[in-house]
Structure formats: C-alpha cells, structure tokens
Image (tube, grey):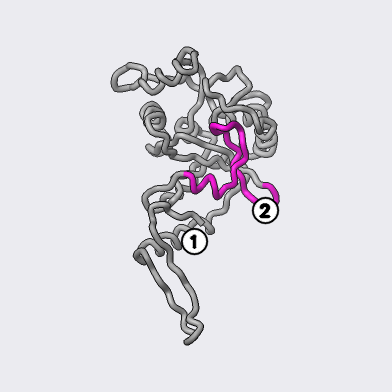
Amino acid sequence: MVVNKNLKGLWILGTNRLKGNIYMVSSFPRFFIFLSLAFIACKSSFEFQEGDILFQDGDCGDFCEAIRKVTHGFDGNSFSHNGVLTKEGADWYVLEAVGRGVVLTPLDDFMSKHLDEYGKPKVMVGRLKDAYRHLIPKAIAEGRKHLGKPYDSVFDFENDAFYCSELIHFSFKAANNQEDLFTPEPMTYKDPETGEMFSVWVDYFEKLGVAIPEGEPGLNPGGMSRSPVLEMIKDFRE
C-alpha cells in the first residue's frame, strides 16, 4: 500500500469487546480514505507485463528542472528517470540505474518513491509494440549482467557504467543484434531560454573534473517515452 507521507493519521477499524460493535476512529477526512481505496483498486486492475518501461517524474531539485527544460516527454509529460520491469517468481522488480549503481528495486518501492499531492505514483507505463516484444527476454538478461556496476555520472557511452536510459538502451541494443532500438540523440546541457549552460551542470562537471559532454550521443527518459517502438498505456496519476 502506498501512503502519502503528508497525511498525518490513519483510520482504525476494530471491535468493541464489551458490546461487539464495530467502531471506526479517524484523524483525517474520509475524502483521503476514498482516494486511497480508489488508487488501490486502480493499481490492482492494471496488469503489468515483463519488459514494461516505467517512466518516473522524480523530485531532484535543479537537476530535474534542467532535464525537464531540455526534454519533452510523451503528451507533454516530464520524466527524469526510468527502469524496466522484471519478475522473479511471484515478485515484481524494476531493473534500474540509480546513484548506487545498477540494481533491482521492488516494484512497490519504486512506485512509492515519488508521489503527487494525492498520494498517487508519478509513473507512466510504456509497453513495447508487438513487433518488438520478442526482444524482451534477452534484453532483461543482458540488463541483469550489469547488476552491481556503477552509475554513469559522466554520461559516457564508452565506459562500463550506466545511467537509467543508457542501461535500457544498451540492454535492448544487445538483444537486437547490436542495432539501436531506441535512437540516441545529441545531448545538451544548455538552457534553451538563454543559450547558456545550466549553472547546476557547470558546477556538477567541474566537481567531477571533466568537460561537459555537450553534443555527445545520449538518451533521456522524456525522449525515450516518445519512441515509436513504445505505446504509453498507463498513467498512475489518473
């Protein structure tokens, strides 16, 4: 169950042992209970499939704002992260590249990471079109080979580290006989309104001691969400 951290209380359902009556005590309005129950029903009615790509609108301050300004996601949405869904037994996990490296994250943990004001996950689901679904098993197997590898903090295709979209890209490329399924594009770290480098990126790369990789090939969640090989099929905020 996903609980909005802004909510201060819970409904408590119990039994009065003396009278045998069921009682209910509340410390926040029924409206929020309705929303929570509606979300649970919505979540349970949606059927995930292995290979689904989960696009997330994360909260990472100035970095996310810079990403949003230079990338445009499906239907005008903003995304700053993504991962691929995989299953182990009866349990769902998201194969993703995060700050601590390439990991498998339980689906519920992924979904509850960034919530909107109603406690709903800021996540959309992209599903490969039928012509490409045969690539999924091999792509996931390829992605799992990178578990434990470091996060690609310099966004370099040539090193043995991965950022979120890079992991997905190379997993499916390997499954597709080394042909791109998702198309890399020149990356930019410039503010489109001013033509100047975002100060957050200038500081970031200066601390790493590397040049800003302006114009180098790369991918981002927003651009990937508009790929013609995908259908965006579910928005958990609706």
Q: Is residue 20 left or right of residue 133?
A: left
The residue most toward the front is 18
Q: Residue at x 46, y 30 (%)?
A: 223
- Looking at the rendered structure, the kind of residue marked 2 is Ala
The residue most toward the left is 194
Q: Residue at x 43, y 63 (%)?
A: 10
Q: Residue 34: x percent and y percent?
A: 40, 64
Q: Residue 20: x percent and y percent?
A: 50, 85
Q: Nearer the viewer, residue 65 or 202?
A: 202
Q: Does the magenta portion include 107? A: yes
Residue under numbered circle 1: 41
Q: Nearer the viewer, residue 54 or 35?
A: 35
Q: Give the quarter of the image for residue 222.
A: top left
- Looking at the rendered structure, the kind of residue marked 1 is Ala
Q: Nearer the viewer, residue 7 or 223?
A: 7
Q: Residue at x 44, y 77 (%)?
A: 23
Residue under numbered circle 2: 90
Badge number at residue 154: none
Density class for disc 2 (Cα within 10 Å; few <14, some 14-19, many ≥20) is few
Above or below, comparing residue 94 to residue 147 in the picture? below
Task: Tell me the element at label 1.
Answer: helix
Q: Residue at x 44, y 38 (%)?
A: 58
Q: Are marks 2 and 1 in contact (CB under 8 Å)?
A: no
Q: Does the magenta portion include 169? A: no
Residue 50 is at least partly visible in this image: yes
Above or below, comparing residue 19 to residue 85 in the picture? below
Q: Residue 25: x percent and y percent?
A: 40, 72
The mark that comes first in sequence, 2 or 1, is 1
Task: Tell me the element at label 2.
Answer: loop
Number of marks in the rendered image: 2
Range drawn in magenta:
88-113
